[in-house]
Image (tube, grey):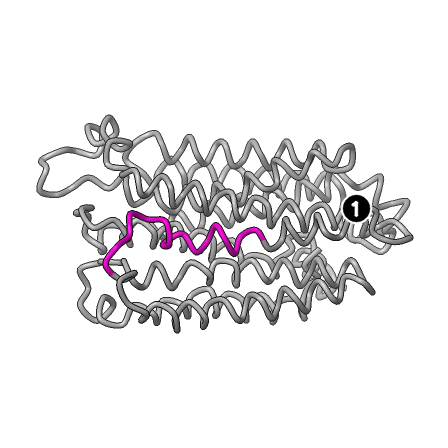
Amino acid sequence: MTGQRFLDLLAIGRVANLPTVWSNTLVGFLLAWTIDDLEIPFEAGLQRLPLLLIGVTSAYLFGTFLNDWKDADFDGEHRPERAIPSGRWSRPAIGWMAAGFVLVSFTCFLQGSGQPLVPALGAALLTAIAIYTVLHKRTPLAIIPMGICRSLLYLLGYFVVISVPDPDSGLTPGRAATSTLDLVQDNALVILGLMALGIFTYVAGLTLAARFESHPGQLRIPRAFLRFLILFCILTHTWWWIWKRPPFLDGWHLAIPTLLCLLPFCAWTGRSLFVLRKSIPDFVSRALAGLCLLDLLAFAGIAATIRTGWHALDASPLYLALVPLSCFLLALLLQRLAPAT
């Protein structure tokens, strides 16, 4: 019984999706060093990373536990095998766990940055999670806050680095707060905006499909529209083609890395869309793991432009693609332990 209760917690937490959260956050983190004139030590950024990862992990678990607490009555009618309707966990206990996760998350966002922008983004993330939980059974418009949640992970990863004060500037973290946005270059805003839009549409598509998991019958949305939402990120995450024509566009040496990053996403997503014809839950589980391969699309550009100051990393930056690939494999492994949806 104890073992089943533990597995229930893993299922409530949708732990199979945690690697996708880490992958999204790490992509935003690495994007900060694609700006050539950003003089921030890589070590200083890394010091902020553990608290940020704990913060986004706790935020995600807050959302999943709050979701099961909110949907207990619905699950009692449609999913009686779940932890709360079956009586293995009480509804108040799950609610208190959700409260604990939100407290840990916001504390990490507060402590993980010396200026108010990261806590503000963290608060926006937690608010979007709460709004989605309230709306997701009521209206398809709930796909908007869910997409915003994933977009904010990119922004949190990026701005936790940008908020690190330049050691040569003589600024304290508190004083750096007034100039954080001044450090953001126009090209960075373009990259962040495109990638935030790409992951927003992808998540909106799979969330829209997930609305029909508990309902009999076929998917009641145009498949062409769903494919557009899922595949739009191919344009947004290959952002380097429009970025002021950097030097690496003068040759063809980016073509092979681009294909190496593009093919896994296309193969996996194509297979997932084929599975959609037979099973909506299987499609949603595959698409969730595919969030890591969506991140992989950006790594050809990241590898071509990143400058961390670490010679070994700057000399072989394409190895960074192992980050989303490892998260993808871990997500698939965890799906064998607990369901992704």
In the figure, 137 relative to 80: above or below?
above
Viewed as shown, does residue 44 lie left or right of 99?
A: left
Looking at the picture, how far across and down is residue 124, in whole percent?
50, 32
Instruction: Name the residue beneath numbered marker 1.
Output: 221
Amino acid type, callout 1: Ile
Viewed as shown, does residue 263 lie left or right of 221?
A: left
Residue sitting at x 46%, y 61%: 297
Nearer the observer, 295 or 104? 295
In the figure, 328 relative to 197: above or below?
below
Residue sitting at x 37%, y 36%: 118
Start and end of the magenta stretch?
Answer: 232-247
Looking at the picture, how far across and down is residue 333, in whole percent?
60, 71
Looking at the picture, how far across and down is residue 181, in whole percent?
29, 31
Viewed as shown, does residue 79 lie left or right of 178?
A: right
Tally the marks.
1
**Residue 323 among magenta residues:** no
Q: Quadrant of the C terminus?
A: bottom right
Picture quadrant of residue 91: top right
Looking at the picture, how far across and down is residue 140, in whole percent?
74, 36
Viewed as shown, does residue 296 lie left or right of 283?
A: left
In the figure, 117 relative to 167: above or below?
above
Picture quadrant of residue 194: top left
Residue sitting at x 38%, y 46%: 191
Q: Quadrant of the N terminus?
A: bottom right
Seen from this angle, which residue lies furthest top? 178
Nearer the observer, 84 or 25? 25
Nearer the observer, 260 or 246? 246
